[in-house]
Amino acid sequence: MTAFILALLAGALVGLALGSLGAGGSILTVPALIYLLGFSPAEATTASLIIVIVTSATALVAHARAGKVRWRAGLLFAAAGLLPAALAGVLSAHIPATVLTLAFAVLAVLAGLRMLRRRTPPENGTVSGPRAAGADAGLGAVTGFLGVGGGFLAVPALVAVLAVPMSAAVGTSLLVIIANALVALAARAATATTLDWALILPFIATAILGAWDGKRLSGKVSPATLQRVFGSLLLAVAVAMGIGALV
């Protein structure tokens, strides 16, 4: 199977996860780029930021049209993560490939376990400035360092910390993700990473199409079933990455 076909298939899987769950899909991007398309960890995390920005922007438009984006809360939340995202983006270029891979494997484990637990964040109406700043600073650092959107972190933080209703949390998290990813990508602009656009572009195209299919899938399959499937997949990916980095 050619790399081009693999890029199409991998993009479709990522889009399907994003469209059906709204979070956790982009974390599949980095391992797909590394193990299916032959990107180095540094190239994969940079390319992932581009893919995350484009696919998240497409999804954000749909959520905004439905009135499910809290713009003020999202922008305030994103502000605290911009500097950590930029610093982490610069730092990532100096981290050994093995360390990046192991760090990503740990993140994939956390994402997989969160999906399998299937717990809804409490909507307690509590708004705390320090808690909000700390939550998004951590999210920004993760985005800049590992090149992932971090929706599985952003959604519960928005609900529990800034009292954003669950119905608007996914759309608002996309705004936060885009802001952090743009800053992290800009911080990496000075690095000498070379990207294979012949593979990135078809990946993005099918990710966008897959996201629309994912929305339809979410109406036919229960969220609990989808979360179990993708959560198990993330755990398997994490194990494979960890073993590959250590062997």
Image: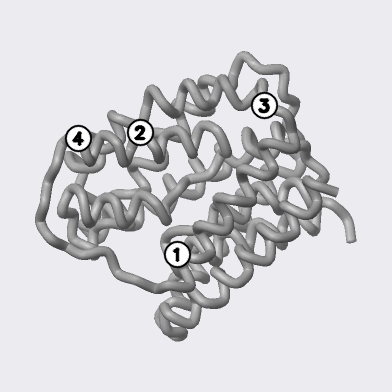
- Residue drawn at x 73%, y 29% is 96
- Residue 11, by quadrant, is bottom right
- Can residue 50 be seen here? The reply is no
Quarter of the image containing the N terminus?
bottom right
Spatial distance from mark 4 to mark 1, Cα to Cα? 24 Å
Where is residue 141? Give x, y as percent: 45, 33
Q: Nearer the viewer, residue 109 or 14?
A: 109
- Residue drawn at x 35%, y 33% is 137
Residue under numbered circle 1: 114
Q: Are marks 1 and 3 in contact (CB under 8 Å)?
A: no
Q: Nearer the viewer, residue 92 or 23?
A: 92
| Residue at disc 1, secondary structure | helix
Q: Nearer the viewer, residue 170 or 236?
A: 236
Residue under numbered circle 2: 137
| Residue at disc 2, secondary structure | helix
Where is residue 220? Give x, y as percent: 44, 85
Up the image or down, 134 lies above or below 222; here it is above
Q: Amino acid at mark 3?
A: Ile
First in sequence: mark 1 or mark 3? 3
Up the image or down, 120 lies above or below 111; here it is below
